[in-house]
Each structure stands twice: as structure tokens, then as C-alpha cells.
Amino acid sequence: MNLIQAGFDILCVFAISDGHLDEREDRIITEYLQANFEGEFDIKNEFQFLISLNEKGLLRIVEEAAIFFDETTTMENKLSILDFCLDLSEADGKVTDEEFDLLNFVCEIWGIDFNKFLDSKGR
């Protein structure tokens, strides 16, 4: 695993958490990651793998990716991922409970107070 794959896993599972993920969201996520993180992996295979998992499997993937991200990058990069998650969730006009739960889960792994993070974003 590398940072771009870890970020992809977190963001894709986050996008899937509202019940669907379309190719446009996949493309936006990929463009964001390529602009902000280094590394390569097979995006199409990873995407197919993620959409084949059940909820428990997806949560395990997020946990593994968040731990890897936590151990290998800066707080600035972590906050960038969280900001992007919020932007992605608000793009469809509503933030679901599942999206908030997943954000909170990642914040816990990263030692970030979820409510303070939301407050800092005016949400």
C-alpha cells in the first residue's frame, strides 16, 4: 500500500457509504489524489475490489488505509482528505448519517476530535 492507494480506499469507501458510487465520483477522487499524493497502483482493479465488498469488508479496508495514512503522512494531509470527504459528501446536496459515521471513524483513528473538526469548518 502507498499513500495514493490508502487515500483512494478511504475516499472511495466514503463515496460508497451513501449507497452508490458513480464513475464521475471515481474520476474526481482519482484526480484529487494524483494532484496531492505520490504513488501508483491499479485503480480499476482496486475500484472493482472495493465495490465487491460488504459493509464489514469496506470498514476493514478504511481502517487499514487510515492506519497506514496515520503512520506515513502529516496532519495537513489528513485534514486535506477529511476536507475532500466533506466536499464530496456535500456535492449531492446532503450529508448522510453513514458519511458522518465514517468520517468520525477515520477521525478517531487519526486522533482528531470530530466535533472540533466540523466546528472549524462551520458545520
Image (cartoon, rainbow, N blue to C red):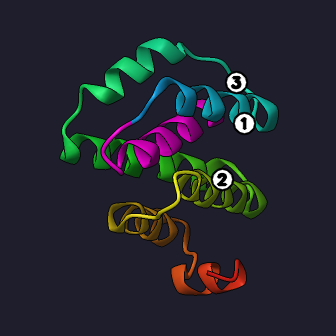
* Span colored in magenta: 1-20
The disc label shown at residue 84, or none? 2
The amino acid type found where label 3 is placed reads: Gly
Marks 3 and 2, how far apart at CA:
19 Å
Task: Residue under label 1, please give it.
Answer: 32
Query: Label 3 crowding class (10 Å Cα cut-off): few <14, some 14-19, many 20+?
Result: few
Choose top left, top right, bottom left or bottom right for residue 80. Answer: bottom right
Question: Where residue 28 sits: x, y (%)?
Answer: 65, 33
Query: Label 1 crowding class (10 Å Cα cut-off): few <14, some 14-19, many 20+?
Result: some
Choose top left, top right, bottom left or bottom right for residue 86. Answer: bottom right
* Tag 2–tag 1 contact (CB < 8 Å): yes
Residue extending furthest front? Answer: 93
Which of the marked residues, 3 or 1, is nearer the chain's N terminus?
A: 1
| Residue at image coords 42%, 22% | 47
Question: Where residue 114 sits: x, y (%)?
Answer: 53, 79
Q: Nearer the viewer, residue 28 or 44?
A: 28
Task: Residue under label 3, please give it.
Answer: 39
Q: Residue 54: tell me if it is visible.
A: yes
Marks 2 and 1, how far apart at CA:
8 Å
Query: Element type at marker 2?
Result: helix
Give the foreground label among 3 and 1: 1
